Amino acid sequence: MDISAEKLKRFRLLSNLSQELLAKQSGLSLRTIQRLEREGGGSAESLHALCATLNISAEQLQHNADPVQARWQRTTVISRLLLFIIAITALLGLMGQASGSSLYIYLDMMSLIIITSFLTLSTLVCFGFNGLVNAVTGLKYLASSQLYQQQATRDLVKLYSYIYKNCYGAAATGSLIGLVSLFNIYAASANTSQFFAGLHVLTILWLYAAVVAECLLRPLIYKLKNAID
């Protein structure tokens, strides 16, 4: 059962109970009370025991299903959008200079498909369809001026932190598969140019993963964590 750590502590203090007294009156161990106030969660039995002791309903002790509340200001949204455009323009300019004014070497549809598919499937497996929807719609909070709703914000931090790590997991997985294929092709044909062309594709895979993780997800995670603090 999804017991709210914040609510449990608040109701315990309102009842003038210490953790030791709450544990004794509810029949739960002190370690369980400490864990629930730190992490939340818990079983149905723990929820019912705490509700009976604190004389509250189960709904009062569980997390709210409310989404993150954000304050939107036109100046903030426009400024964030302009900063994003400037950053992307500068990045593309640097990439063009590094490649002799040609950006085509950075375009690889297969790498994009690998990254997108891996992140989509892994998020679906671990967080379900609602988690995937929250991951996509939550990107809008990059442009908000202020965020509210502590628990929902924490949930987004966990979600995006998982996806952040999976960006590099997708690149690593794609690279391993690609290397096996490249070595098999090279062993059969000894074509050096084809081998190095394949390595270029694997490099692009890591570039895409880094752009998504560092330019999009890391700033969003930082913003959400600041809202919690």
Image: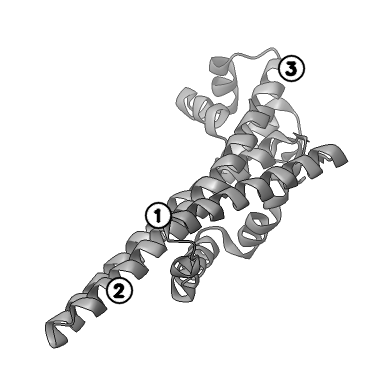
Q: Amino acid at mark 1?
A: Tyr
From this view, report whether residue 23 is shown above or below residue 194.
Answer: above
Residue 198's label in the rendered image is: 2
Give the camera-side residue of 126 and 178.
178
| SS for callout 2 | helix
| SS for callout 3 | helix
Horizontal arrangement in the rendering, residue 97 relative to residue 130 (left or right): left
Examine the rendering and report whether any part of residue 207 can be seen.
yes
Q: Residue furthest bottom?
A: 189
Cβ–Cβ under 8 Å for marks 1 and 3:
no
Whole-percent x and y of residue 61?
A: 70, 35
From this view, report whether residue 167 is shown above or below residue 146.
Answer: below
Q: Nearer the viewer, mark 1 or mark 3?
A: 1
From this view, report whether residue 190 is shown above or below residue 121.
Answer: below
| Mark closer to the chain start, 3 or 2 | 3
Whole-percent x and y of residue 103?
A: 50, 65
Q: Which quadrant would residue 179 be assigned to in this image?
A: bottom left
Q: Which quadrant would residue 148 be assigned to in this image?
A: top right
Whole-percent x and y of residue 101?
A: 49, 62
Q: Which quadrant would residue 176 be assigned to in this image?
A: bottom left
Residue 109's label in the rendered image is: none
What residue is shown with label 3? 14
Label 2: few (<14), some or many (≥20) within 10 Å?
some
Residue in view at x 50 percent, y 46 percent = 214
Q: Amino acid at mark 3?
A: Leu
**Disc 1/disc 3 C-alpha distance (Å):** 46 Å
Residue in view at x 45 percent, y 26 percent = 31
**Disc 2/disc 1 C-alpha distance (Å):** 19 Å
What residue is shown with label 1? 168
Q: Nearer the viewer, mark 2 or mark 1?
A: 2
